[in-house]
Amino acid sequence: MVLTGFDFFIIILFIIITIALGWYAKSNTNNSIEGFFLGGKNLPWYIAGLSMVATTFAADTPLAVTELVAKNGISGNWIWWNMLLGGMFTAIFYAQLWRRSGVVTDAEFITLRYAGKQANWLKKFKAIYLGVGMNAIILAWVNLALMAILEVFFDLKGIELFGFTALAMLLVAGYSALSGLMGVALTDAFQFFVALIGCIVLAILVVNSDQIGGIAGLKNALPKHSLYILPSVGDSTGSNGLSLGLASFIAIAGMVWWSSWYPGAEPGGGGYIAQRMFSTKNEKHSFMATFFFQFAHYGIRPWPWIIVALCSVVLYPDLGVDDKKLGFVMAMKEFLPSGMRGLLLVAFLGAYMSTVSTHLNWGASYVINDVWNPSKKTSNIIRFSRWVTFGIMILALGVTSQVKSISGVWEFIMECGAGLGLLLMARWFWFRVNAWAEIAATITPFIVYGLLKFVFVHDYPVLGESLSSNPTSFFITVGVTTCCWIIVSLLTKPDPQAHIQNFKNKIYPQGFEQFKKTIPHLFLAWLGGILTVYSFLFMVGKIIFQEWAESGLLLISLIFGVFLFYISAVNGGLLHSKES
């Protein structure tokens, strides 16, 4: 792709604004752990929420959506749309509880909830496992996506391609180390708007091109089933939308959201999503930020990606199965005029930077807060935090050089967190759960994964091949892990009553029994929130495709969902201003 002077101007301006925001945040960051990793616990809901949304918009996200749509039509997005159920559950039931906990990381929460040496061991293990090991793998995945984009854009290869990626990561590590979470959150908000505007512009240009001929031309050029929003369950042939049978779809939609740990979609909240909750001004802001994240992530962002993906099916029908995701980048390369090329490039760069900056800061928070656990020498804390940030960057680049498949990383992460999710939700309410149960839930998926993927396949080829394929292996891992940690909870001693009571006093200051009385209202708010987001998502799609009768019905559904959500949220205490 040839970039003009105006394109380079757009790119340089974007980098300057990003660095300026980081420098501004540095002057407003306290020299403490909470100042560096939680922004002084003073983020308003809209900044924290935008930061969550921007982080989940990685460079690979539009490519992944393009691949799903190219293979299964619009309904292929249910692979990730189903996770709204868990995300909304987190916003309604857990956002305020996380903010009230007063911890810096979700690893620190372990010693707040559990007692004994096993809790301290588990805290340090999870800090290293999530903050260093898993974090480096996720960052390698994000780097691979950026490299795929740069390769198509500029025809870069080998060491040159890796060098540009390393340079981009160094830039991100620089402003992340400079300003801490406050700078990450501010740059995230800016980068999100740039990325969203860039994708909207691309969608408009491509769909209105002569090759497509507008929405009407797009609809005429595609098989009807490609435009189905709901999967054609019951048909497992792949001829009608999402190629899932009824049983498989129900299993995925009904199981994934509560059962599996996955970055950004942890059941009950966790990771960098929990970090943003900790960083908000109070409990109300924590809830509002998390709810806004669900609405923006599932309701606002998908359609520009989907439109470009559908157009790429028409424009590039000869792309192989493994290359369909590149249709998005090829559309960028072909249809963007001067200036717009720079805008779309910085859109992807912004998506990449917002994800990497969060993971670097989040990963360093585990090392500092839960492994090093420093004294009150704040100058040393900030200095060491910055070095750790760069250390994680170097480790991630090393892993990037060894990882070859994005889908392989995705499968590994999903499988090795399968079955842990229910425990992460239950530990807030069921006090038989202890540190031994969480240790079992953390380790068991790795054991089952190894047995299914390596031992059974080697010793029993036919049976092993069947059991190790997705989604069968995922369901097996969820079942075994869930049974394992429940049994461990029942067979081991619960934590001392005094420790549990201290936890209840902190998390439920009005009393655990009083909290239980709000649960019916919270469930109604959950249902109202889900109805609101899905109605809005589908209504926008129907408007885009000029299907006015359906969009009118969805508008009525949206209004009802908003009403149910608001009334239930008020009665459940979610919109009360509470200072922690």
Image (cartoon, rainbow, N blue to C red):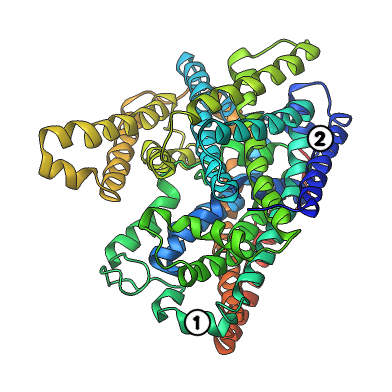
294 shown above or below 224: above
**How far across and down, in percent of the image, does residue 328 sit?**
54, 59
| Residue denoted by label 1 | 219
Image quarter hosting the C terminus: top right
| Residue denoted by label 2 | 22
Which disc is residue 24 wearing? none
**How far across and down, in percent of the image, does residue 396 sit?**
54, 27
578 or 32: nearer the viewer: 32
Amino acid bearing label 1: Lys
312 or 3: nearer the viewer: 3
Of labels 2 and 1, the one closer to you: 1
Crowding near pointer 1: few (<14 within 10 Å), some, many (20+)? some
169 shown above or below 376: below
Labels 2 & 1 near each other (Cβ < 8 A): no
- Judge from the rendering whether residue 557 lies leftward or rightward of residue 129; answer left or right: right
Marks 2 and 1 sit apart, C-alpha to C-alpha, by: 44 Å
Q: Is residue 171 visible?
A: yes
- Mark 1 or mark 2, which is nearer the start of the sequence? 2
112 or 73: nearer the viewer: 73
